[in-house]
Amino acid sequence: MSAWHALAVHARSESSAAAELQARVDEVFLPVRVERRAWSDRIKVAERPLFPGYLFVRMALDARARVELLRCKHVVELVGRLPGDARIARAIPDHEVEALRIVVGAERALDPIERLVPGRHVLVGAGPLRGARGVVEQGPDGQRRLVVQIALLGRGVRTVLRADDVVEHVNQAA
């Protein structure tokens, strides 16, 4: 059965790894954010990985597939090996990757964070972030922020919730 998995890849080679993996897996997802950098004579726009050193692949994972992944030039390791079985890694829930896709696609400012945020899980029911599941936190400026988390990595990304983003509480186990 096909599921999402996280791959650790060599630093600054996320795009190359994603291109190499395209033909080997069902789907590759490299979440990026757009950064604008001001130079003395111009403004440069660049895409940077949200989680440097990681990308996500959807595939049916077995021992043979794991070996094929590890043969890829830029791949370091599958993240989250199961205890007692070094060949297999834990899958990432579909809703975590889907929520990440939604916030990346919403073209809003994204702030990657390297920790998990405790709190009650919500589902955005309306607005550009519709369908995203995450945790709502109150920022120091009083604005509400949605934090989408990838628990396996212990990381997340936050974005500001606007008035048209309607949130509903959900059961965390769902």
Image: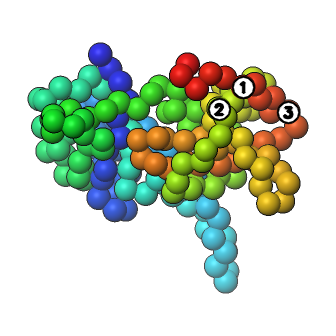
Task: Judge whether 30 appears above or below 109 on screen.
Answer: above
Q: Name which residue lies at 35% across and 24% down.
A: 3
Bin the neighbour count of mark 1 within 10 Å (Cα to Cα): few under 14, some 14-19, many 20 and up.
Answer: some
Q: Residue furthest top?
A: 1
Q: Which mark is drawn over residue 169?
A: 1
Coloring scheme used:
rainbow
In this picture, residue 173 sits left or right of residue 24: right
Alpha carbon separation for disc pair 2 and 3: 18 Å
Determine if residue 122 is in view: yes
Q: Which mark is drawn over residue 111?
A: none
Does the CB distance between marks 2 and 3 fall below 8 Å? no
Across and down, in percent, residue 88 comes to 20, 32
Does dot 3 land on a helix, a strand or a loop?
loop
Q: Name which residue lies at 47% across and 41% down.
A: 151
- Of the residues under marks 1 and 3, which one precedes in the sequence? 3
Q: Residue furthest bottom?
A: 40
Image quarter where the C terminus lies is top right
Frontmost of labels 1 and 3 is: 1
Does dot 1 land on a helix, a strand or a loop?
strand
Bin the neighbour count of mark 3 within 10 Å (Cα to Cα): few under 14, some 14-19, many 20 and up.
Answer: few
Does the CB distance between marks 1 and 3 fall below 8 Å? no
* Quadrant housing residue 87: top left
**Residue that carries the numbered disc 2 in the rendered image:** 121
**Residue that carries the numbered disc 3 in the rendered image:** 164
Across and down, in percent, residue 166 comes to 81, 29
Across and down, in percent, residue 169 comes to 72, 25
Does the CB distance between marks 2 and 1 fall below 8 Å? yes
Amino acid at the residue labelled 1? His
Alpha carbon separation for disc pair 1 and 3: 16 Å
Amino acid at the residue labelled 2? His
- Of the residues under marks 2 and 1, which one precedes in the sequence? 2
